[in-house]
Image: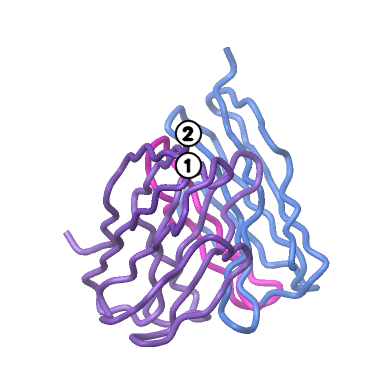
Amino acid sequence: GQQLNQSPQSMFIQEGEDVSMNCTSSSIFNTWLWYKQDPGEGPVLLIALYKAGELTSNGRLTAQFGITRKDSFLNISASIPSDVGIYFCAGEAAGNKLTFGGGTRVLVKP
Amino acid sequence: NAGVTQTPKFQVLKTGQSMTLQCAQDMNHEYMSWYRQDPGMGLRLIHYSVGAGITDQGEVPNGYNVSRSTTEDFPLRLLSAAPSQTSVYFCASIREPGQGYGYTFGSGTRLTVV
């Protein structure tokens, strides 16, 4: 089946830092979605991308749909403590099935 | 508030027991799906439904059954629980996939099989 490689698996942030994560696939997707999951909750949609090359922002979040349709990145600018959580990329292919990356766990630097 | 409601939030089963995880949405979404979440593996699709009366298998369907008798409800049944089914289960719905709106997820059911 389709697989999404999401990196990094985890990262530590310091307040004010910019962070970046990405997803790559061997398959083409029609839509890329980025979700955030807080402890004990389900994933919540952050950004949806549905055109190759599209760059979309949502507040401090910016995401891009790769031109090859096989990758996407998410940037968080000026991170704050509430940015802690697990971020998932998801690709939607023909047949309307979502494939999720393994997640990027964002933690606060001790 | 409108959304996806999952019950129960927590469940412990003994190996071999059966149970049904409930999922209901009040947004009149046609498309519903079940995922399981395991550490480091993201969410994997178990079963999905594109409308009442229609279901299909996802990536990891073995050991699970679903039915969709109404638009609102999409229960997931574990026929004979196994320790490998210990996981967090999420139900999700969307009005129409491929439109960039994203899926709405429930808050999950944490299942432990002993």
Q: Which residue occupies the extreme front position in the image? A: B16
Which residue appears at 64% of the width and 83% of the height? A94
Which of the two residues, B112 or B49, is positioned nearer the viewer here? B112
The quadrant in which residue A11 appears is: top right
Judging by the rendered image, the residue that carries numbered circle 2 is B114
Q: How many marks?
A: 2
Q: Is residue A11 left or right of residue A48?
A: right
* Crowd band around label 2 with a 10 angstrom C-alpha radius: few (<14), some (14–19), many (20+): some
Specify start and end residues of the magenta stretch as a single range. A30-55
SS at badge 1:
loop
Q: Are marks 2 and 1 in contact (CB under 8 Å)?
A: yes
Locate residue B113, reporting x and y percent: 47, 39
Query: Which chain is disc 1 placed on?
Result: B
Check disc 1 and give the amino acid type.
Thr
Query: Which chain is disc 2 placed on?
Result: B
Task: Find chain B in the image and tell me its colour.
Answer: purple
Judging by the rendered image, the residue that carries numbered circle 1 is B15
Chain painted blue: A
Distance CA(mark 2)–CA(mark 1):
6 Å
